[in-house]
Structure formats: C-alpha cells, structure tokens
Amino acid sequence: MSLSTIAFDADDTLWSNEHIFHLTEERFRGLLSSHTDISTLSNSLLETERRNLGYYGYGIKGFTLSMIETAIEVTGGQIPASDIQEIIHAGREMQDHPTAPFPHVEEVLKSLKGKYRLLVITKGDLFDQERKIAQSGLGDYFDGVEIVSEKTADTYKTIFQSYGDGPERSMMIGNSLKSDIHPALDAGAYGVHIPHDLTWAMEHAEKPENTDRFYQLKSINELSGLLDILD
C-alpha cells in the first residue's frame, strides 16, 4: 500500500529547541556553582526532571519547576529568594525565545503539501507548543496538529487511524529514537530518524533492528528521495 500520511515531530525536527535548555542549564549551574560541583548538580536536575514528569509533563514549565526544586535541595533550603527569582526569569526567557524553522523544512513541506496528509505530533506543554507552531509560520502546511502528553504505540495508532488510513500507510519523522521512532514502528508505521546534535538524556535509545520500516537521514532535505523510493 502506498504511503498516505506523514507526521513530523516538532522540537529539534522542524526547529531548534534543545539548545535553549542547554544554555539555561549552563546559567543554572553558574548560579549554584558555589553550592555543589557541576556533575552533581546536573545529575540532581536530571533525576528531579525524571521524577516530575508524571506531575508536570514535558516542556519549559516543568523544567523551570525542576530547577527550582533542585536548587532548594542542593542548598539545603538556603537558596536566596533572589536566586529563585533568577531561575523563574530564565524560564520566562526560554518561553520568549523566537522559533524559526531549520533550513529546507519549509520547502520540503511545500513540496509534500497536497500529496500526503501532513501532521505534527509533538509532546510538551500545550501553550508553549501552540506558540512555537504559530511563530514558526509552518502551521498552514499541516492537516492536523496533535500535542500529546506521551508518545506511545497506541498514541500513534489512534492518530494515524483518525487522520489517515492507519499506521501501515503512515510515517513518523523525528529526532528522538525513543519517542518518535520506536513507538511508531511498534504501531506498524514507518519511522524516519533525523538525528540532532543535542538530545535530552531521557530521549536516548538504541537504533531499532530487524525491521524494514526504519530509515535514518542526515537531514530533512533527503526526505523527498526516500519517498520516491518508497512510493
């Protein structure tokens, strides 16, 4: 069966996102450098983020709250209110960071529009993701946008059945093997991995094996060539 639906991850697939978190974490480490070493602080923050996912989900708000909680823990509750205010300010600056598509993204979407049903499937804070999609100027290329709390095989099955002809005729494109590729393949869809230089530690996973539905591209500019082969 020919491909009918193509879905894209948003952050670090259509536009850059992780670098903002890295820059803010560097700022956070500088703020607390007198209280603990960098390695301990980074590990503490990661564990706090992991623990808080079930409460706050993904995105800038959860990250900001995790920074505040980590700061309280590593200082034994002695962090000055002014430093907490600095962390809050850093989180707001993340929200205000402009969103611009990666090179070639818009021209690729333009070439696919009308040939396939195009979707965005992304996880994170609803307000923040809607803001970035609107600011990117890419919204009109998509037939649907799904902002989900978690990406699972059932999530992909439901979305691809709702918008398209089921996962068998659908493709998921993203930078995260853990969230974008493995569950999409488990749902029966194609999974196309486009690596990004920066990947959050909790998104790391091994490449899938024993499947003819997994592909890896160096950039989104190679997608048209892949689609020519598959169609």
Image: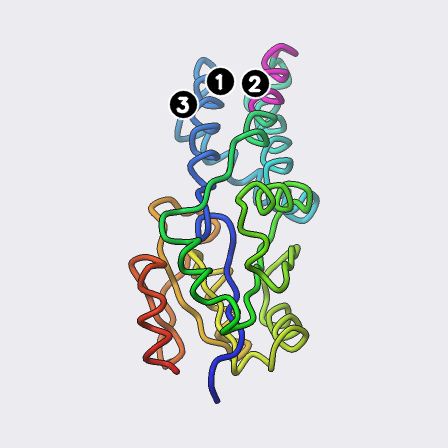
Give amino acid for label 1.
Answer: Leu
Give amino acid for label 3.
Answer: Asp
Q: Which residues are magenta?
A: 80-90
At a point 52% along the width and 65% down the height, the residue shown is 7
Classify mark 2: helix, strand or loop: loop
Task: Tell me the residue that label 1 is attached to.
Answer: 32
Q: Residues within 10 Å of mark 1 (few under 14, many from 20)?
A: some
Establish if 106 lies above or below 132. below
Q: CA distance from mark 3 to mark 1?
A: 9 Å
Q: Mark 2 or mark 1, which has the lower sequence index?
A: 1
Classify mark 1: helix, strand or loop: loop
At a point 65% along the width and 12% down the height, the residue shown is 81
Q: Nearer the viewer, residue 227 or 87?
A: 227
Q: Mark 2 or mark 3, which has the lower sequence index?
A: 3
Establish if 13 lies above or below 117. above
Give amino acid for label 2.
Answer: Thr
Which quadrant is the C terminus positioned in?
A: bottom left
Q: Residues within 10 Å of mark 2 (few under 14, many from 20)?
A: some
Establish if 53 lies above or below 214. above
Q: Residues within 10 Å of mark 3 (few under 14, many from 20)?
A: few
The reply to whether dot 2 and dot 1 touch (C-beta < 8 Å) is: yes
Task: Tell me the residue that label 3 is attached to.
Answer: 37
Q: Nearer the viewer, residue 202 or 134?
A: 134
Q: Nearer the viewer, residue 114 or 191?
A: 114
Q: Position of residue 205 (x, y in %)?
A: 41, 59
Disc marking residue 75: 2
At a point 61% along the width and 77% down the height, the residue shown is 164
Name the mark nearer the viewer: 3 or 1.
Answer: 1
Q: Position of residue 73 (x, y in %)?
A: 60, 25
The reply to whether the magenta stretch includes residue 142 is no
The reply to whether dot 2 and dot 3 touch (C-beta < 8 Å) is: no
